[in-house]
Amino acid sequence: MVIVVKGTRKNPQVQELIDWIEQRNISVQATEGTQKTILGLVGDTSVLDIDTVKTFPVVEDVKRIQEPYKRANRKFHREDTVVEAGGVRLGGGNFQVIAGPCSVESEEQMCGIAREVQAAGARLLRGGAFKPRTSPYAFQGLKAEGIEYLTEAGQMCKMPIVTEIMSASDLELFHDVDIIQVGARNMQNFALLRELGKQSKPVLLKRGLANSLEELLMSAEYIMAGGNPNVILCERGIRTFETSTRNTLDISAVPVLKKLTHLPVVVDPSHASGHSALVEPLALAAVAAGADGLMIEVHNQPQKALCDGAQSLDCGQFAALMKKITALRALVTSFGAEEERV
Amino acid sequence: MVIVVKGTRKNPQVQELIDWIEQRNISVQATEGTQKTILGLVGDTSVLDIDTVKTFPVVEDVKRIQEPYKRANRKFHREDTVVEAGGVRLGGGNFQVIAGPCSVESEEQMCGIAREVQAAGARLLRGGAFKPRTSPYAFQGLKAEGIEYLTEAGQMCKMPIVTEIMSASDLELFHDVDIIQVGARNMQNFALLRELGKQSKPVLLKRGLANSLEELLMSAEYIMAGGNPNVILCERGIRTFETSTRNTLDISAVPVLKKLTHLPVVVDPSHASGHSALVEPLALAAVAAGADGLMIEVHNQPQKALCDGAQSLDCGQFAALMKKITALRALVTSFGAEEERV
Amino acid sequence: MVIVVKGTRKNPQVQELIDWIEQRNISVQATEGTQKTILGLVGDTSVLDIDTVKTFPVVEDVKRIQEPYKRANRKFHREDTVVEAGGVRLGGGNFQVIAGPCSVESEEQMCGIAREVQAAGARLLRGGAFKPRTSPYAFQGLKAEGIEYLTEAGQMCKMPIVTEIMSASDLELFHDVDIIQVGARNMQNFALLRELGKQSKPVLLKRGLANSLEELLMSAEYIMAGGNPNVILCERGIRTFETSTRNTLDISAVPVLKKLTHLPVVVDPSHASGHSALVEPLALAAVAAGADGLMIEVHNQPQKALCDGAQSLDCGQFAALMKKITALRALVTSFGAEEERV
Amino acid sequence: MVIVVKGTRKNPQVQELIDWIEQRNISVQATEGTQKTILGLVGDTSVLDIDTVKTFPVVEDVKRIQEPYKRANRKFHREDTVVEAGGVRLGGGNFQVIAGPCSVESEEQMCGIAREVQAAGARLLRGGAFKPRTSPYAFQGLKAEGIEYLTEAGQMCKMPIVTEIMSASDLELFHDVDIIQVGARNMQNFALLRELGKQSKPVLLKRGLANSLEELLMSAEYIMAGGNPNVILCERGIRTFETSTRNTLDISAVPVLKKLTHLPVVVDPSHASGHSALVEPLALAAVAAGADGLMIEVHNQPQKALCDGAQSLDCGQFAALMKKITALRALVTSFGAEEERV
């Protein structure tokens, strides 16, 4: 940690701060300038709260030097984490596409879509049973019944299933779910994250609309600190001033996260754009940028979808896209292989 | 609702859309231009999902004309809502200051601060027992014990108390709490909002960091739709590109909300700025802009605060600020009184 | 244009507004609801100023239906524009990489880099002579001398050159420049745009840090309205709350712009990210998303660059990246070719 | 400046960086941790370019400690700057309201409005002659003719005049203008700023839509570095995700700027909100937060305004607002006076 203070060590307030720090078994080295002094701290500074340090009136600025996340940090865990769910591996070179409808609507719908997305090459099946909707008057999902239909569709096709949780009190309904999704609006629902850390199913954690990548990693850390190392990060667009897309896909999040963490990173081009016509270019961009997977909304009849039809591909569009994704992923993999040879 | 479509009624796809709408007992009037047609819809359009409408390929744009919130809407409830908690009224001309520490730390601390803020003129006491922290390794609050200390301090001073809830499963611990706060990160934790709608204690609902005012009102609507009309809205700063303040206080939110809704609007200048030196100018700005109240962090020893000390006023600073707030509020009230006479 | 008004035609203020519109040779069709009326306008609504319409007290909302840009609009110009500069074509299937240093520093530097980027496959040479710097005390570019060195390097390698203009009064210095760049900070310097519309050299127009895609197209329209149709649009990242990258590359801008306009769209991954390590993944993402070209900063000795060294590739890195770009572009082209066959 | 590097001094790359810094007459003190070393630099670090430092591969992070602006910095110029224009003083306790129409439309209009705003208490007259408009097809202002009408109105009422410049090449037309305004879109038009630094008329510099307060101060520094110390800063709203207001007024900018700089700070509530109904609460908030002045759009017939009528007050509304502003300013001044007595 670096602390910038007004004045020099001759200032009793500066000395008081140094004493306060040293009492916490942290050593301090001061570099005095003409108007300010830089304090370099060595030791376990995680015990210092930045906000408390800032309350000392001589303090001008405080900077952490160590990232505040440990378990999620690639520095302490060099190799990629591979998350396994129902026999399917994601991360560490295992690229996967998660596909399915925004909402589970019926058994027929789920089974129909499952067959189609599986034939096209997806190996994980998604479908929303609990739907976070801005309006209390909008369709809120089939809940337990929805999980049931999704489970049946998954079992029929032998595809592991992914669905969103909105409250820890529903956790018992997720017994047959393979990957539990935390939605963007709950990324900092710390009570929920803590509960998900106490169980062992993989968690697909979506980035909040206004959350930094560091905050996303800190939320992953909540889950990991509880004992569950199986976290998949998902970039799904952030909120900006631009209104031509529903959100702004932060494509840089992919390489930045891959550098900072060992956890797998997937991209959701459907929610990021909000328009089915944009799903293909954003999906391909995500693969080119190095994502470990994609999460794509597919519906057999987008016009009859109960939710988010405007951003869903139909099954034919999805199959056509999967061919391109496969070809592109092979090319990207060959780039990596060549680099390793060099 | 207005729908803009490509082409004219001669286009069979346009006619198909019109039929689809009319089947829902909504009448459609078409205004044909040279390249596009405007469909004006009359009837209960709340049954139409905008996303579904957008999946029709001829649709270029869809606009709702009615606000999507009803119970929170001033159009259907002209007079200001007055929220009453423990004998204190807030809203409808009743201006209140809610004060206290970020975190409850001990009984002595709470009682000491309570006495001081009460003497200075605050009539509602705050203190965090459950603390949403970005890091799983940071102090998470005293929880049940914190609520106990806060309750004792409130009873000692006969001040109603306000504290944050993070999970509906903790609700039973809030028996003696007068106003339940929902933090910014949980503004769209719909599972929690729904539970708070089923009980009757007033809810202080903070705006999320990246949430629009309409979304804030929709979250209030969740609570109200459940049967609890006692919602207080709180502007506490939004996330922008500017880094000189912790968040950007959206002062316009005050007059915009006062126009759109009958619910009381309070401002939290402490979280908005993150710096104690900015609390005074922002608090005064909020009063001048017409806020119904303020929520201000006060600590007896900011440097020893376990959380957010940098933005806390000490008791002397708070007392000095209260004098200015009182004088300013009197002036603002006189402006309103004069207008009514005119 | 659609105007939503309070009340019905019986309200004299509504009728007054309708009269005011009809005097402008625009016909109005009213769809009356219970509380509001929707006015659909047919005719040349470009003569109506939205702001003026909003001053009528009965007006609740106004929406334009036609895009406000004409010359840049794909609806009126279906085929892709191909911009030609010094014998090199960009757009309409002609993919190009523009490469070179942030700043021109010397003749040797420019000639050395030009040879290297040309050998690697770039066909357009960039280099900054006028540098917009946040600080008046930072290096501001070699100006006329810089353009001279760049021109010599371009002539030596027979590469057309691209460089930024900061003031219309410098235009005469750009005689030998092939493409004139307008930087992000000048995207709405309308006096400059107007001057560039009066001359015929192609203009590479960078999106401003906080400008919407519609505003970018309106700025292109300024140039085109003056008579110069040769505009290349450049996405280079927008300003958001995220700080792990210098800006947030809005990758969706590529497919959105390709749909709205016939003008070529290039991406600058160097400025978007600010880190050389991110240039490759973002460049590949841009190609995958369908960009018509890339603009990449390359320096022979990034550590000795006078400006923006942190985001520059060295010549070896650039050559390695060009191989990947070429392979990826071939794949993306094959996707398009297959679709046309189908 | 503080530089964080990987490893310790034993790493030859760390030593190479230290040597490189010391060659520039800057002394370096290293604080070695287990994984990283903190380098504290003492001396004139303004010669170091942060971007260049970042190109050294061992560098993890670089932080400036000194603000990059000098002439605008309150640290080096404690007392408030008072800007004087045509006999009217602004800043240092001199509160002023600048009022007038968005666009100059005719001599009659300007003289009429001038008389009204003067009678209401404004002492500076504004009116746009050169109008930066997003669309090339919108009214662009009366230009030279507009300045003439404004000048006549100012002379008639003996009010100094404020109007916007869009290009340095128009400077000769500003001979009779008292304060030259730089609009938000030109805040980083450095060529224009530099020219305005070479002349002596006061400059009213508006903050750009996506510019930080530090960038605003750096743009002021451009003008001041050229020799013109008469800069007035203007907060007029920033661009965020919120759409209920045209921009988001950053009210915190007032106290933050007052702390960082000695220059006067005024607020433009008209552009910040875009709605006339919001001008009053935002104007009062700005006064309460400590602004040195306001800039308010006033039109005699807002519905017939050629530009921005929706946000203009009519003369009666302005006169009513001025009474409140005057009473509020007196109260705020009394707060300050009391503090000085204490």
Image (cartoon, coloured by chain):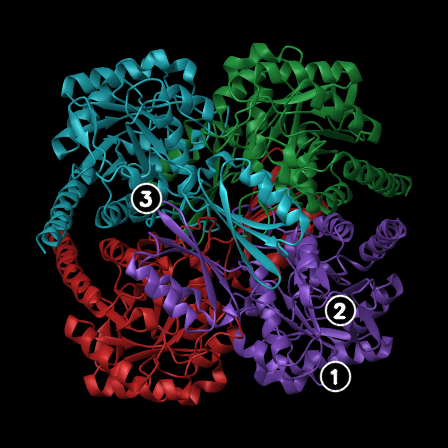
Chain colours: A green, B cyan, C purple, D red
Q: Earlier in the sequence, mark 1 or mark 2?
A: 2
Look at label 3 and name its amino acid.
Leu
- Tag shown at residue C81: 2
Q: What is the chain identity of the residue bearing mark 2?
A: C
Return the residue at label 3: B260
Residue C193, position in %: x, y? 58, 76
**Front position among marks 1 and 2:** 2
The reply to whether dot 3 and dot 1 touch (C-beta < 8 Å) is no
Q: Is residue D92 above or below residue B17?
A: below
Q: Position of residue A85 (x, y in %)?
A: 73, 18
Q: Which mark is residue C176?
A: 1
Q: A151 left or right of C17? A: right
Residue nearer the viewer, C256 or B241: C256
Residue B323 visible in the snapshot? yes
**Mark 1 residue type:** Asp
Output the chain of dot 1. C
Point 89% across, 41% down: residue: A334
How far apart marks 3 and 1 lie (CA) works out to 58 Å
Q: Secondary structure at mark 2?
A: loop
What whole-number distance in Å separates the C-alpha atoms at marks 1 and 2?
Answer: 23 Å
